Image (cartoon, rainbow, N blue to C red):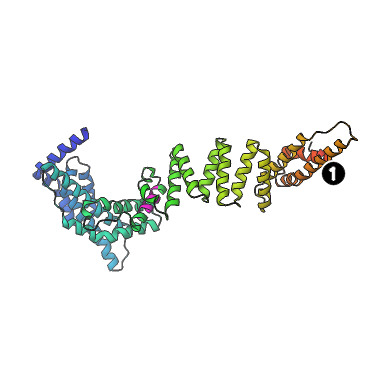
Amino acid sequence: MTQKILSFIFICVAVMSPAAAQKELKALRAFVKAKNTSEAMKEVARLEADSICQYMPKLYELAVKAQIQINDIENEKVYLKKACDTAKLFESTRQIFNYVHKGDSVERLQMDFLGKKHELDYGKVKLLQRYYKNLLAGTRYFYSRQKYPEAQRHLYTLLRLSKSPLWVITPVDTLSKEHITNAYMYTYCAFTNKDFAEVERYKHLLLSDSEYYASALEMYARTANDTGKSMEFEKYLEQGVATLPLHDYFFEELASLYTADERYAQCVALADQRLAADPHCLKGMYLKAFSLYQLEEEKACIEVSKQLVAADTAQYYAEANYYAGQFIMNELQTIYLPTRIRSKAFEEAKREMKRVCSEALPYLERYRKLCPSQRERWAPLLYRIYLELNMGPEFEEISAYM
């Protein structure tokens, strides 16, 4: 409220003291007349920082003239085929739009203060239309060269034309592909520049566009994560998995999140969601096998682990061999071994034990080969297998580890 009152007072002073305004702007007029653009813009910056002078429309008119002079100088270099400062050329174009809009805003404030109707300044409208293509070219120039801070500033100026009262003659179709593409580029620049407060500015547009949906949603998720918004991060990931089940980023990040929190039942559901979209997805199989192992769902874990081992020709998911081998060996605990060695029941129990060990053998030997340092895991199991299967040399060799 205090700020509004102060602004009102400063507007009053600016409107009611034209003589003082002329005095304050004298140096700037001289610099513009002499085409001393460097000093002119320094003076513009000084006056803009002044609590009263910033409400003088003439300040912005002179700033526009200085920027047009800068633009003309660089354009003339292009015409004469001399070295041109392209960045300076496009920045002056952006500043033309910037100062035209600032001046128009100040004029509207003054008209409101005086109770007068603000008339559309067609001179300003034509000026913006004249430089529009150059503004558009500037955004593409900086964006294509990965100069994202400059590109973001240009795109901001370009995109706000849709709400500019000076652009009413040629209104911007905010649903056009060009506008949505500009919104996407602005979002990408803001994300790359870590200007996180601006990343979601055009969220309503991008999440309704099929071309940019995936990339935009990923940027929103990454931004939520980078800014510590854990609940939003998880929601974005879940939305990504639901709508883009084959997109690795959402699946992998959500899997990591669930795993870190030991939400293994949700991991299984997530894996099933991925496998429903791609039954041959090794990542999905592994997440399911790992989670079932943690949940001690032995039969289901053995089944999916076997499928993964068979499909994993590169043998990347070595742990699946251990899951299958250990849980298969757990079946020995369910076999009752009679004390009468010569009984038929004893022979049947021993046959069943050998069957279990034979089934587990290839998985645990493969695990040993792939993970030799994990001897505390594979050695006890292979010791039991070699003993039950009467594999003398192997048993003697594994005994050294025991």
Residue 85 seen in the current view: no
Q: Nearer the viewer, residue 289 or 319?
A: 289
Left or right of residue 278, residue 31 in this image: left
Residue tagged by mark 1?
A: 391
Left or right of residue 20, residue 355 in this image: right
- Identify the residue at horizontal 53%, vertical 46% (top origin): 251
Is residue 314 shown in magenta? no
Left or right of residue 6, residue 85 in this image: right
Farthest residue in the front direction? Answer: 344
Q: Quadrant of the C terminus?
A: top right
Residue 389, quarter of picture:
top right
Which amino acid lies under the numbered mark 1 shown in the image of this protein?
Met
Left or right of residue 289, residue 60 in this image: left
Region of the chain picked out in magenta, as a range:
182-190
Q: Quadrant of the N terminus?
A: top left
Is residue 189 shown in magenta? yes
Residue 393 seen in the current view: yes
Farthest residue in the bottom direction? Answer: 80
Q: Nearer the viewer, residue 73 or 147?
A: 147
Farthest residue in the top direction? Answer: 339
Determine whether 195 is above or below 139 in the image. above
Residue 140, quarter of picture:
bottom left
Q: Main secondary structure of the magenta part?
A: helix
The x and y percentages for residue 119 are 13, 52
- Identify the residue at horizontal 48%, vertical 43% (top origin): 238
The x and y percentages for residue 371 are 70, 44
Q: Secondary structure at mark 1?
A: loop
The x and y percentages for residue 24 are 14, 45
